[in-house]
Amino acid sequence: MRSLVVVAHPDPESLTHGLGSEVTAALSGDGRSAELVDLAAEAFDPRFTKADLLHYRGEGPTPPDVVREQARLDRAEQLVLVFPVYWWSMPALLKGWIDRVFINGWAFEYSPGGRLVPKLNQLSVHLLAVAGGDADGYERHGYTNALRTQIDHGIFGFCGASIASTRIVYDSETTPVEALAAEVNSTVEHVSTLAAAL
């Protein structure tokens, strides 16, 4: 089992980075390997530029940084996205990574008859979100369902990838450190157990 753990947060000391590092360690060893990708540290450009648009139209090559990210994903059986919730979604850095990397011809394509053909059926995905809000508020206002609709179904379902799990660490800015550590441990154990079962 080879995993790709992608973290999108500007602060390497953040809870998000800590969770990403713990998950990467848990998914390594015993015949398994995991690569940690820090999009901020690598200065990944999330902007869908003219070069991306030309490639989308079939008028230009795939940008080299996109080719690199697709190669990383081609080597992985499992993708773990670790991110803070910004306005009930993922940060622009991670959304831009998806916008640029999960493109027509690689993540999906249309058959000559116009039928959608998902191309990432081999990929299993874990979504690990860190939220400032509480679980009751997320459920009451429908934020959890909104996240699942746009990310689980709208992105990965569209590309044929399977969602292995979606976990949200709530109250990240107000919960005592010890309780947060316990929640991180529980989340890491959950992902590791599911990965071992694949």
Image: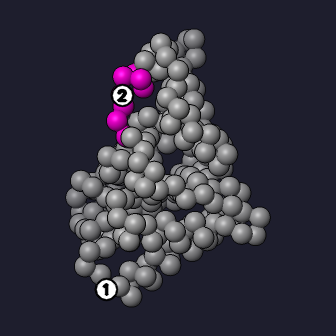
Please tell me whether residue 6 is drawn above or below residue 136 in the rendered image.
Answer: above
**Label 2 Cα crowd, 10 Å radius (few <14 / some 14-19 / many 20+):** few
Q: Please tell me which residue is depicted at 47% across the width and 13% down the height of the picture.
A: 59
Q: Which residue is mark 1?
A: 176
Image position of 11 (left or right of 196):
left
Q: Quadrant of residue 35?
A: bottom right
- Nearest the viewer among 130 and 54 is 54
Q: Position of residue 126 (x, y in %)?
A: 52, 57
- Nearest the viewer among 125 and 18 is 18
What are the residue bounds of the magenta stretch? 46-53
Could you tell me which secondary element the residue under label 1 belongs to? Answer: loop
Which image quadrant: the C terminus? bottom right
Residue 49's label in the rendered image is 2
Q: Position of residue 14 (x, y in %)?
A: 36, 70
Determine contact: label 2, label 1, CB under 8 Å. Answer: no
Can you see residue 13? yes
Q: CA distance from mark 2 to mark 1?
A: 42 Å
